[in-house]
Amino acid sequence: MSKVKYYYDPESLSYRKIERKKRTTFKYTFIFLLASALLGFMFVFIAGHYLESPKEKALKRELLYAQLQFDFLNKKMDEAETVLNNIADRDNNIYRVYFEANPIPDEQRKAGFGGLNRYKNLEGFDNSKLIIESNKRIDILQKQIVVQSKSLEEIAKLAEEKEKLLVAIPAIQPVSNEDLTRMASGYGMRSDPFTKARKMHWGMDFTAPRGTPIYASGDGIVVRADSGSSGYGRHIRIDHGYGYISLYAHLYKYNVKKNQKVKRGDLIGFVGSTGRSEAPHLHYEISKDGNRINPINFYYGSLTAEEFSKLLEHASMENQSLD
């Protein structure tokens, strides 16, 4: 119940009751309601902009955490790209050069993905651009890893083949220097000991006493150990693979047989003078892909620089061969 209010009337020298008109009451009521509405609106506006609800705070924390995770992911991708680029550089400029393989172009290593929009399902979000760019980088990194992985598999196979090649190539002198009397004749035009005519001498003659050990110059398989080839007498042929075959002629006797596997340095026979031979010696030949080549280029596995220089000097002399 509202309080009754009075005012003092100086004319009657008494207090009179204040009578409020209905219009005035309505006016004050309207002003009060309007002021209340305005205050309420301002409160809601201020609260919406400057005050956060628990749900909004939680969402804000989640967004901040997601941003930090994206930043961390991008740093990791930067590191991965740096490592992959270093590996790719070594792969192209060291490994593939050493094993005589063609380098992989950057266009192939870092190629993107064409065709349909593979990231369409990531569009329409607040951070769609960031999400799409991150996914693109991850996809390209995955592709680079696949390309590099296949390249390293190829290099591993080439390395294995290279290792086999290095032990297979006829790379040592077939007669030890301690047992060698002299290097009688080298590869090239020489005087025939029987006809005295100049003709091509296809190998190297190592003079040594009868029975001097002869060693396989590389890993391989004995494909011949017989005397069925004209002029060579008892001889051995070893197939080293990769197109290389070594021949050891005028032997006294064998220490291997056909189809036997041998390793570099294995004793395969003994010096003799069988076949078309003037004196005990080893006639040694190397052929590559069916073409006979100079054996002087294949002694890097057993001679010192000084020994090789002396051998080269004697081999280059145009003297008389022994077969």
Image: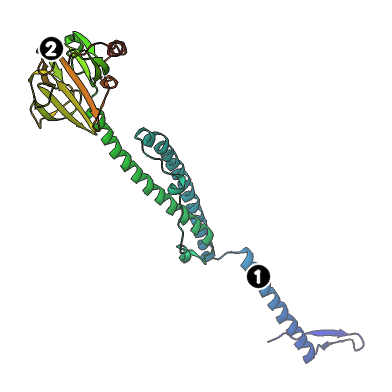
Residue 255 horizontal/vertical position (percent): 8, 22
- The amino acid beneath tag 2 is Pro
Q: Is residue 225 visible?
A: yes
Location of residue 170 in the rendering, given as x and y in whole percent from the top left corner: 23, 25
Q: How many marks?
A: 2
Q: Position of residue 98 (x, y in %)?
A: 36, 32
In the displayed structure, 20 sits above or below 110; it is below
Question: Where residue 106 sits in the image (x, y, percent)?
Answer: 46, 45
Residue 40 sits in quarter: bottom right
Residue 156 sits above or below residue 23 on the image: above
Quick one: 264 or 287, which is closer to the camera? 287
Q: Which quarter of the rendering shows the C terminus?
A: top left
- Look at the image and tell me whether residue 61 can be seen: no
The residue sitting at 11% across, 29% down in the picture is 224
The numbered dot on residue 190 is none
Front one among 129 and 262 = 262
Q: Is residue 274 left or right of residue 87?
A: left
Up/down of 183 relative to 55, above or below: above
**Residue under label 1:** 45
Q: For residue 280, which numbered disc appears in the image?
A: 2
In this view, which residue lies farthest toward the bottom?
Answer: 22
